[in-house]
Amino acid sequence: MSERAAVESPDKKTAQWTRKDLLSLEELTREEIEHILVTAESFKEVSAREVKKVPALRGKTIANLFFEPSTRTRTSFELAAKRLSADLVNFSSSGSSTSKGETLRDTAKNIEAMNVDTIVMRHSSSGSAEYLARSIRAGVVNAGDGIHEHPTQGLLDIFTIRERKGTLAGVRVCLVGDILHSRVARSNIWGLKKLGAHVTVCGPPTLIPPHIEKLGVEVCYDLNKAVESQDVLNILRIQLERQKGAFFPSIREYAAEYGITRDQLRRAKPDVIVMHPGPINRGVELSSDVADGPNSVILDQVTNGVAVRMAVLYLTTLVER
Ligand code: CP
């Protein structure tokens, strides 16, 4: 997208976009997801330029509120805001007045009172982004809420698959690992199904949510069988910080049954792509030779994350409210 286009056509770009918030992929229509992806395609080129900036959000202010650790999501939202020429403030719970007992709503209300246009929030509570969106006039972008959803991760995963495979329709995607605690899995399932992909989930029975078939996915507990027919393997992190109890006997046994190694990949189609949202537990869910090997698109996911977040900030921040 040229600077001129970005300045002159925001109304055209946002014409079909009516949401001040992005809370989940469950709530989006297929057309809204397509709209974000097409907008992200036009923004991807900006990050490859010598001067990586367009004035699309000049004069707007974005706040990053992260109550949980993050490397990729936080950094890419920051870069996205800056490449759109928005002002950005970073807030983290440590060192803030939340440690003195201030509530989430009061914290956000106070930040909003400084005329912030959009708040990007990561929080350990499922539903916290929706609660915030109902409480404030500023836009809210969910950067991960508990085990509920991580919509921009789902979008960047879908963007990356479409870039590599040309379409989502009929593409076979297997999500492997800790489905139960994974907000990335939930966003992937909603988004991929809406765009016509065939989704399988694979992991130990204890880490597959009961009745997940109702979301239209296939369930497979045998990784050897699951990998054979897939176009995409999206490997999820074991979320030890969210597991209250023993879901498998040991990390070593988990890695032996559900870790993706070079040997395991030999069963897969030669052009299978291997994805991971990061951070990777190397040697547990993925061996290093796979994570860094020719089938891996893990760093492409990170690159695409900036374009997708530029699109999301652009669309949500420019909506009339
Ligand atoms: N994928 C992801 O959410 O990574 P971070 O936790 O580093 O943001």
Image (cartoon, rainbow, N blue to C red):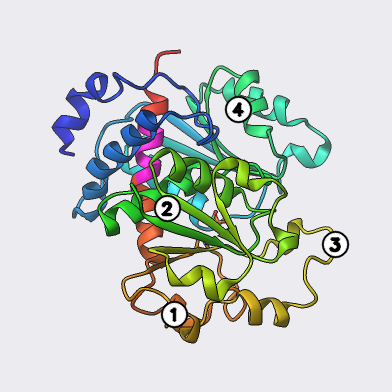
Q: Helix, strand, or loop for circle 1?
A: loop
**207 lies left or right of 112:** right
Q: Horizontal and vertical percent for residue 230?
A: 42, 65
Residue at 66%, 65% (x, y): give it: 238
Residue, disc 2? 157
The CA distance from mark 2 to mark 1 is 23 Å
Mark 4 or mark 3: name the one nearer the start of the chain.
4
Q: Which amino acid does label 1 sit on?
A: Arg
- Using the rendered view, name the quadrant where residue 266 is placed: bottom left
Residue at 52%, 68% (x, y): give it: 226
The CA distance from mark 4 to mark 3 is 37 Å
Q: Helix, strand, or loop for circle 2?
A: helix
Instruction: Judge the density around disc 1: few (<14), some (14-19), many (≥20) Cα neighbours within 10 Å.
Output: some
Q: Which amino acid does label 2 sit on?
A: Asp
Residue, disc 1? 267
Residue, disc 3? 245
Q: Horizontal and vertical percent for residue 59?
A: 36, 26
Mark 4 or mark 2: name the one nearer the start of the chain.
4
- Dot in front, 3 or 1: 1
Write the start and end of the magenta stretch as one range: 308-314
**221 lies left or right of 189:** right
Q: Which amino acid does label 4 sit on?
A: Ile
Mark 1 or mark 4: name the one nearer the start of the chain.
4
Mark 2 or mark 1: name the one nearer the start of the chain.
2
Q: Is residue 60 above or below residue 201?
A: above
Residue 78: image tag: none
- Using the rendered view, name the quadrant where residue 32 is placed: top left
Residue, disc 4? 111
- Any magenta on residue 135? no
The CA distance from mark 4 to mark 2 is 31 Å
